[in-house]
Image (cartoon, rainbow, N blue to C red):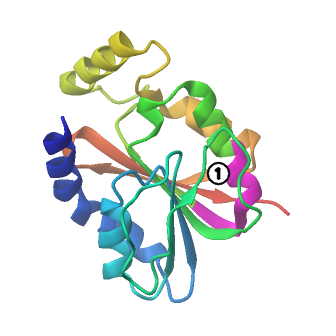
Amino acid sequence: MLSYMSSAAERNLEPIAEQLKPFLVDGISVLEIASGSLYHAKRLSERFGNVTWQPSDKVLSQQKVFLSNLLPVIELDVNGDWPSERWDLIVCINMLHISPWHSTQSLFKNVASRLQLNGKLFLYGPFIEDDVTTAESNLTFDRWLKDRDPSYGLRHLNDLDRLGLQNGLTRIKRVAMPANNLSLVYERQGQ
């Protein structure tokens, strides 16, 4: 499974980088949720040296950081207390479907209080849309996830949009990505 994850991360890096590029302007701060192996953190912070990238994970990685704009990994459980800092962009890649729904709820709630005004939340992964036929591979993946843990599974885009609005986050972008994934961008509105 690990080699599959590594090849998938490598294959999806370019399309993810292209979607993030408009938001990675000079001097912004990025918090990455569930950084795991730090693959995306390392590759994206290397490519976008003009931003400060803060990786995080529930379990601290033992990997060392060697880039000036890539900060050491912080321990962050999406369901727990978050650092008091505010970020311009929060990135969450391939987490929502491999965590319980309450983790998605916690993510949106915490993101809303940790984003700068007009800050963005970038989500990437497989999702289900009411008005779009779901690929058979995604339905199979959804069943596989739920067989392992009934609280896991692909999330419905309408549920995410409602959750966003409840927390002052409005979806401003949806892009179909390779391998039947989507990139979604939510913006913090309000005060």
Work out which quarter of the rendered image holds the C terminus and state it.
bottom right
The image position of residue 134, as x and y in percent, is 29, 26
Horizontal side of 95 relative to 56 (left or right) equals left
One can see residue 25 in this view: yes
Residue that sits furthest to the right in the current view:
191
What number of labels is visible? 1
Horizontal side of 80 relative to 138 (left or right) equals right
Residue type of the residue flagged with mark 1: Thr
- Check the image and report above or below for 101 versus 37: above
The image position of residue 123, as x and y in percent, is 46, 50
One can see residue 129 in this view: no
Residue drawn at point x = 77 percent, y = 55 percent: 113
Residue that label 1 marks: 170
> Residue 92 or 120: which is nearer the viewer?
92
The image position of residue 95, as x and y in percent, is 44, 40
Residue that sits furthest to the front in the current view:
62
> Residue 129 or 119: which is nearer the viewer?
119
**Residue 111 on the magenta span:** yes
Secondary structure category for the residue under label 1: strand
Work out which quarter of the rendered image holds the N terminus and state it.
top left
Label 1: how many Cα within 10 Å (few below 14, some 14–19, many 20+):
many
- Check the image and report above or below for 136 versus 113: above
- Check the image and report above or below for 115 versus 176: below
Range of residues picked out in magenta? 109-120
**Residue 94 on the magenta span:** no
Horizontal side of 42 relative to 79 (left or right) equals left
Residue drawn at point x = 54 percent, y = 70 percent: 30
Horizontal side of 79 relative to 138 (left or right) equals right
The image position of residue 44, as x and y in percent, is 34, 72
Residue drawn at point x = 58 percent, y = 76 percent: 29
Q: Locate residue 116: give its quadrant.
A: bottom right
